Image (cartoon, rainbow, N blue to C red):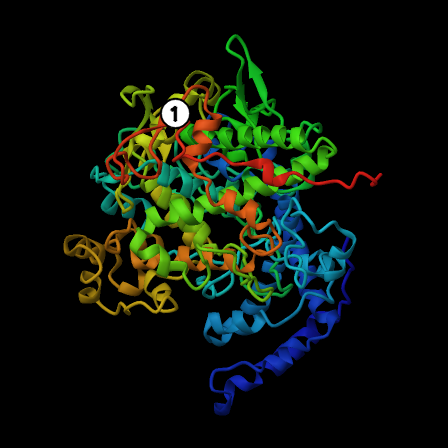
């Protein structure tokens, strides 16, 4: 696969790097590396360090075969398995992460052997190394920038989006593509500047126990739909994969059956288990001292260079319905009926209930229950979310059926792609015009995006210089933010909105989805549109801090996992992220009191000692919300940055000229989530106008019949295609 290197290469690379290091002893260099010398290291010398990385991975392969033979893998039904479902790597991810590990090993080798021994700043060295291109090495052809050049798009039909997000940007067709690296707002913060996690910070589980106590903070104006939609679009734009054994394709486990760390001989190098103290209030009686955490799968850097570890996003980076349609041609095709533009669905007797296709893959569910399949493996993760996925697939088929009637000359492909384009536009419209104003308040939503998003008409403000790639930090905060809004129960409501029954949420994360959807579809929809949401803060229910993916009493802790993941990804601290957001600097405890509750600040500083150590996810969730909003200034900045670039950097964004006609665009602007629930439920008859708000918080403070003109239907007559009678 790779070329073997010249044995003289190690001496030659040393010479070149020592030349590059010559400026270290010269005052005029002023702490800056001679990047010109570094970047001109000949290919032969670079291939030597790549060869070193390959040999290191070959050694790892031997360990991985040993682990597989000893059955040291994640067991189906365990709490680790529930976690694995949410981050299961694709075949493409497994292959590319192996190449990335080679480059990380090579980068670390150079840094350790020739740079860090001089005691210089690790981040400075890492930045210097990221100027060295992989293009001329044996791994250069593996880079996405090599595989997807501008010429790649010339042979494609660019009328419709690709399934994997490629060729949206015609100058850089790999921007936004699935299975590429997340984007960085700020340079990553690793202990060694390259890959090593910071082990000097407080224990994640102890942070969770101290700061994430459930306090039942209810938001009286907003419904659970806010958190569910956040999770829904989070799935659309981000899907972080966990590392797996590259040699055996097996999952990695770091804790044994009793909940203790594996012995060193069985501990995979990519393990980063969370230590549970023997004084832990919940896990102490269970005698658990280890929570499984495996580092996220890396990928080659988008600019095809050496440098710090970057994590892969298996989803497309655009707001493009990839969680419904899939992120590759193969997956998309497997979800289509391949006639009439329809998506696959199953009909169940005796009531002929329509549901998502049932999967024959036993690894999609926590237990051996029947599971559903969609464009994203996390479809079964929460009953409310599963119901929402189902609504959108049903809406696709409803629209495709109507388009087929008014355009009988359209074939399956045209019907499917035109319907998909409408569905994506509806998701974008609801996100920006219903969900966002409720999340950040009406008074903040217009300034939030005013210069980028004109609600009164289409504005041509797409630019191919804006990279819409999902940021690493957005991917890390959107899921815990959503789960913070979730209560302890799943509420099922009758048509009159009286509570029918409740289920404990921890019993249904990737569990019993078949039963919930077939028996309670409408009640689930009524439930998340009437149940009041928890406030978004650092208060999490016991169901996600102790019992997430529970197995025999032992579950995962989403707060601990989120903190550990932020360290794994090298996410800089809370104080560092406020600077590019142009927010008030945080330099001491007094500054924290201005944006957080004084009691929590005292507790925070007893744990962290230094304000610059406070992790982003912790600080962002502890920050007081902006007046009228659900989130604080830092979280708002992160979401704004992502949505602005989605709006500016998506060539197919729904309100751009020529994407739709003016009449079609006017119809899409009438779309509400309330209408989708009315049109695609089995028997829902009434709903509030804005389902993200409680009935009392809606202006009319009442429920409306689904046939009300205040819940307008999409008039598809504007999609009639006039065909010349002489055309054949």
Quadrant of the image occupied by residue 189:
bottom left
Q: Name the outermost residue toward the left.
A: 599
State the residue in front, 523 or 726. 726
State the residue in front, 428 or 409. 409
Q: Name the outermost residue toward the bottom.
A: 28
Report the side of 560 relative to 113 (left or right): left
Q: Quadrant of the C terminus?
A: top right
Residue drawn where x is 65% and y is 57% of the image: 174
Q: In the image, is residue 175 above or below residue 248?
A: below
Q: Is residue 399 visible?
A: yes
Q: Which residue is mark 1?
A: 524
Q: In the image, is residue 184 above or below residue 504?
A: below
Q: Position of residue 345 (x, y in %)?
A: 59, 23
Q: Name the outermost residue toward the top.
A: 350
How packed mark 1 is, by other alpha carbons closer than 10 Å (few <14, some 14-19, many 20 or more), is many
Report the side of 569 relative to 342 (left or right): left
């Amino acid at each position: 696969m790779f070329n073997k290197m010249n044995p003289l290469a190690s001496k030659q690379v040393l010479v070149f790097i020592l030349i590059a290091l010559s400026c270290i002893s010269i005052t005029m260099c002023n702490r800056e590396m001679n990047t010109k010398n570094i970047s001109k290291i000949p290919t032969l010398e670079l291939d030597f360090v790549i060869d070193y990385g390959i040999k290191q991975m070959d050694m790892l392969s031997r360990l991985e075969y040993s682990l597989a033979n000893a059955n040291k893998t994640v067991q189906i039904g365990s709490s680790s398995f529930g976690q694995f479902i949410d981050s299961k790597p694709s075949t493409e991810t497994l292959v590319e992460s192996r190449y990335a590990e080679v480059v990380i090993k090579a980068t670390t080798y150079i840094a350790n052997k020739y740079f860090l021994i001089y005691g210089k700043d690790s981040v400075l060295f890492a930045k210097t190394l990221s100027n060295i291109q992989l293009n001329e090495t044996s791994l250069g052809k593996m880079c996405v920038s090599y595989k997807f050049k501008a010429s790649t798009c010339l042979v494609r039909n660019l009328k419709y989006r690709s399934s994997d997000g490629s060729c949206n940007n015609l100058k850089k067709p790999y921007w936004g593509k699935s299975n590429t690296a997340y984007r960085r707002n700020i340079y990553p913060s690793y202990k060694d500047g390259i890959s090593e996690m910071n082990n000097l910070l407080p224990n994640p589980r102890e942070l969770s126990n101290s700061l994430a106590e459930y306090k039942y903070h209810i938001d009286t104006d907003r419904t659970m739909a806010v958190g569910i939609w956040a999770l829904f679009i989070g799935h659309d734009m981000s899907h972080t994969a966990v590392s797996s054994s590259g040699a055996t394709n097996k999952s990695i486990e770091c804790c044994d059956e009793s909940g203790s760390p594996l012995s060193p001989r069985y501990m995979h190098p990519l393990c980063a288990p969370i230590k549970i103290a023997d004084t832990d209030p919940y896990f102490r009686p269970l005698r658990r001292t280890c929570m499984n955490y495996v580092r996220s799968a890396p990928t080659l850097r988008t600019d095809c260079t050496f440098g710090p570890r970057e994590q892969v996003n298996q989803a497309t980076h655009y707001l493009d319905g990839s969680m419904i349609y899939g992120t590759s041609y193969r997956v998309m095709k497997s979800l289509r009926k391949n006639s009439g533009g329809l998506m696959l669905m199953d009909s169940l007797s005796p009531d002929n209930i329509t549901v998502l296709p049932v999967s024959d893959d036993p690894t999609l569910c926590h237990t051996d229950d029947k599971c559903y399949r969609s464009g994203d493996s996390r479809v079964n993760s929460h009953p409310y979310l599963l119901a929402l996925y189902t609504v959108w697939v049903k809406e696709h088929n409803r629209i495709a059926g109507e388009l087929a009637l008014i355009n009988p000359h359209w074939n399956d492909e045209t019907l499917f792609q035109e319907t998909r384009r409408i569905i994506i536009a509806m998701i974008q419209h609801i996100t920006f015009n219903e969900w966002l104003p409720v999340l950040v308040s009406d008074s903040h939503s217009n300034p939030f995006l005013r210069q980028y998003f004109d609600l009164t008409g289409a504005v041509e403000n797409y630019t191919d210089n804006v990279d819409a790639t999902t940021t690493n930090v957005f991917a890390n905060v959107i899921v815990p933010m959503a789960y913070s809004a979730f209560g302890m129960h799943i509420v099922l409501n009758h048509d009159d909105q009286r509570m029918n029954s409740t289920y404990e949420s921890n019993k249904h994360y990737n569990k019993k989805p078949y039963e919930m959807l077939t028996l309670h579809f409408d009640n689930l929809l009524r439930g998340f549109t009437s149940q009041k949401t928890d406030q978004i803060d650092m208060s999490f229910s016991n169901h996600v801090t102790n019992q997430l993916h529970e197995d025999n009493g032992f579950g995962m802790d989403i707060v601990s996992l989120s903190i550990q993941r932020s360290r794994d990804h090298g996410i800089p601290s809370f104080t560092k992220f406020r600077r590019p957001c142009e927010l008030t600097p945080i330099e001491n405890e007094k500054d924290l009191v201005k944006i957080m509750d004084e009691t929590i600040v005292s507790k925070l500083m007893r744990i962290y000692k230094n304000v610059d150590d406070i992790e982003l996810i912790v600080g962002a969730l502890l920050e007081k919300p902006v007046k009228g909003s659900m989130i604080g200034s830092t979280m708002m900045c992160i979401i704004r940055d992502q949505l602005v670039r989605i709006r500016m950097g998506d060539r197919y964004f729904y309100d751009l000229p020529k994407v739709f006609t003016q009449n079609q665009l006017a119809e899409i602007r009438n779309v509400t989530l309330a209408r989708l629930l009315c049109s695609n439920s089995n028997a829902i008859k009434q709903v509030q106008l804005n389902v993200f708000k409680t009935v009392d918080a809606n202006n009319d403070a009442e429920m409306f019949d689904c046939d009300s003109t205040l819940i307008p239907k999409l008039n598809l007559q504007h999609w009639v295609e006039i065909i010349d009678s002489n055309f054949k």
